[in-house]
Amino acid sequence: MENQEVTYLVFFITVIFLVLLIFVMTMVLNYYRRNKKYNHHLIEIQYRKEQEILKSQLEIQEQTFKNISQEIHDNIGQVLSLVKLNINTMDCNHREALKDKITDSKHLISKAIQDLRDLSKSLNTDYIADLGLARAIEHEMEQIQKTGGYQIQLDIKGKTYRLEKQQELILFRIVQEVLHNIMKHANASAIDVHLLFDPEIFTLTITDNGVGFDTSKLELNNYTGMGLGIRNMHNRANIINSSFKMTSTLGKGTTTIVTLPLITSKS
């Protein structure tokens, strides 16, 4: 009888051990599966981030070429046309008028050269990294101001510092998108851009005095109720872990705020 009890005890202990072993192995396998799935998810996030950054680079390059084309057509082409007109109407028999036209042509050519120098900076696809975010935004606003259709103001507060290259690239792309929307839809006469370089947080604010729009859809489904441009800006802001907020009042304009907390981003 004692041997039978011992046998039962051994059998019971063996069963318990096997159950525990199976349980532990199942937990380990589940852990590895979850870890593998999590790593795969991280890889997908990183891939999407890299693709979005590449897309932003290509869009910035495309926008740069559009600006160059517009600048050549509207400014440099017009200036050179005036120089050509001066040359075609020069009369050596009228010395005083000839002297004025030569002087005027020199000034026009100097202006064309300076405009070409400004454009050459934009031809460099890494000019944002070279200039820095603040200077790149300033340069973008200078181009808008040249159109003569807007009162431009750039306000920079705090000691400027550089962000990560990817952060500056995406923030600049958001600025370009907002400015493009203002010029296309807002019917505004003034554009104000404010950059706050706080040690713990970077804040970008863009305000216009245009017609504004109904923002009720902005709160629906996390900005998905709005157009592609606003959704893209919101998604790009998420890529660099920043917040994107747009407010507007009909007849009083629109304000866009992008806030980037600084943890390890400041160099």
Image (cartoon, helix red, strand yellow):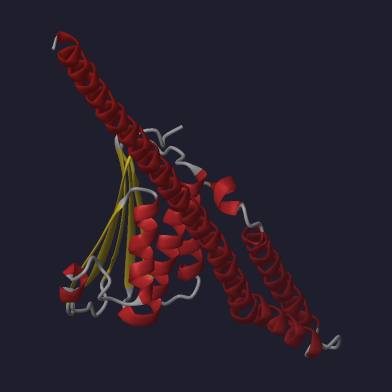
> In which quadrant of the rendered view does residue 255 lie?
bottom left
List x then y, in percent, for residue 82.
Answer: 69, 83
List x then y, in percent, for residue 94.
Answer: 80, 87
Compared with 104, 263 (above or below) is: above
Q: Residue placed at 47% from the left, 41% from the top?
A: 164
Along the line of sight, the residue nearer the viewer: 42 or 153: 42
List x then y, in percent, for residue 160.
Answer: 41, 39
Q: Residue placed at 42% from the left, 73% from the top?
A: 180
Along the line of sight, the residue nearer the viewer: 204 or 215: 215
Left or right: 146, with 15 as reference point: right
Q: Residue placed at 71% from the left, 79% from the top?
A: 80
The N terminus - image quarter: top left
What residue occupies the far right of the structure in this picture?
92
List x then y, in percent, for residue 247.
Answer: 20, 66
Q: Residue placed at 37% from the left, 64% from the top?
A: 233
Asked whether the viewer can see residue 126, the reply is yes
Left or right: 188, with 99 as reference point: left
Compared with 143, 184 (above or below) is: below
Along the line of sight, the residue nearer the viewer: 16 or 231: 16
Asked whether the viewer can see residue 199, the reply is no
> In which quadrant of the rendered view does residue 85 lie?
bottom right
Q: How many numbered circles are shown? A: 0
What residue occupies the far top of the structure in this picture?
2
Along the line of sight, the residue nearer the viewer: 26 or 219: 26
> In which quadrant of the rendered view does residue 18 lie?
top left
